[in-house]
Image (cartoon, rainbow, N blue to C red):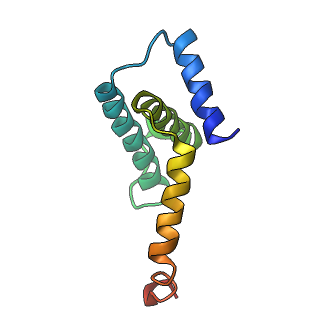
Amino acid sequence: MTIQQAQQTVDQWIKTTGVKYFSELTNMAILTEEVGEVARIISRKYGEQSFKESDKQVDLADEMADVLWVLLCLANQTGVDLTEAFNKNLHKKTERDKERHAENEKLK
């Protein structure tokens, strides 16, 4: 599935199953919450924190998909074509960082 197809799929789901989009502000709060859930898993799986018994059944991939879902919602609501935005962003990073990372002693 392409990013464009994902945006269209989310839009169709919202209009048929979800009834309507939550407001942009609500979706921004939900996005923050979902990113926090990803951070919680990462800090326990790869960091120094330990899982509580109630956290042991968490699914990192599912939480990342939740982040993507809400991001796609926000893009649809605000008229952002994420395919175009991603391509522009990749070009910007490539031009800006083409030598920066290769010359970074910390990455060698």
Q: Residue at x 53, y 13 (%)?
A: 15
Location of residue 80 with respect to 86 vertically, above or below? above
Query: Considering depth in this image, is 79 or 58 the residue closer to the camera?
Result: 79
Q: Quadrant of residue 10?
A: top right
Residue 3 location (% of width, % of height):
61, 41
Location of residue 96 with respect to 24 vertically, above or below? below
Q: Is residue 63 left or right of residue 4?
A: left
Query: Considering depth in this image, is 78 or 60 the residue closer to the camera?
Result: 78
Quadrant that contains the N terminus: top right
Can you see residue 37?
A: yes
The furthest residue to the right: 1
Q: Residue at x 57, y 37 (%)?
A: 62
Query: Considering depth in this image, is 83 or 46 the residue closer to the camera?
Result: 83
Tag count: 0
Q: Is residue 28 left or right of residue 99?
A: left
Query: Considering depth in this image, is 92 or 102 the residue closer to the camera?
Result: 92
Residue 69 location (% of width, % of height):
51, 33
Residue 16 location (% of width, % of height):
57, 10
Location of residue 44 with respect to 70 vertically, above or below? below
Q: Residue at x 45, y 32 (%)?
A: 70
Residue 83 location (% of width, % of height):
57, 45
Can you see residue 17?
A: no
Q: Is residue 105 left or right of residue 10?
A: left
